[in-house]
Amino acid sequence: MQLDGKLIEKEGHDYLMEALDFPDYYGKNLDALYDCLCEASFEIEIVNASCVDKDIIDTFKDAAVENDFLKLKMFP
């Protein structure tokens, strides 16, 4: 699955919710993002990662460390 950092920057959690098919109850905050990513099972590639807020990138990285079924690749 490929995510565009420019869209994450522009649309934030709304984009992530739709792109990652998060449930309707997704809280649209970093804690909710972490929780959903820790339950996910897919490979995520973030292109234009330099556009993404550091806190969001850190949340993806932390979840990938916690969840063996979540693979993360980032491209500038």
Image: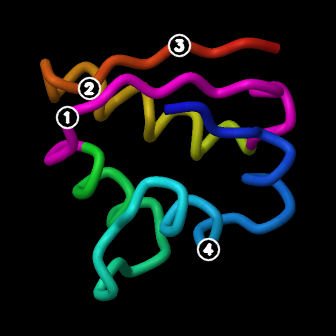
- Residue 50 percent location from the top left of the image: 83, 26
Residue under the image location 26 percent in, 56 percent down: 36
Going from the N terminus, do you reach mark 3 or mark 1 first?
A: 1
Mark 2 to mark 4 CA distance (whole Å) = 20 Å
Confirm or deny contact between disc 2 and disc 1 (CB under 8 A): yes
Q: Residue 15: x and y, percent?
A: 64, 64
Q: Is residue 46 above or below residue 27?
A: above
- Residue 7 versus residue 54 in the image, above or below: below
According to the image, label 1 marks what residue?
41
The tag earlier along the polypeptide, 1 or 4, is 4
Q: Which comes before the other along the chain, label 4 or label 3? A: 4
In the image, what residue type sits under mark 2?
A: Leu
SS of the residue at dot 3?
strand
For the residues bearing labels 3 and 1, Cβ distance under 8 angstroms: no
Judged left or right of residue 69, residue 56 is: right
Look at the image and give the residue range highlighted in magenta: 38-52
Residue that label 4 marks: 14
Task: Determine which residue is flagged by label 2.
Answer: 70
Q: Is residue 46 covered in magenta?
A: yes
- What is the secondary structure assignment of the residue under circle 1? loop
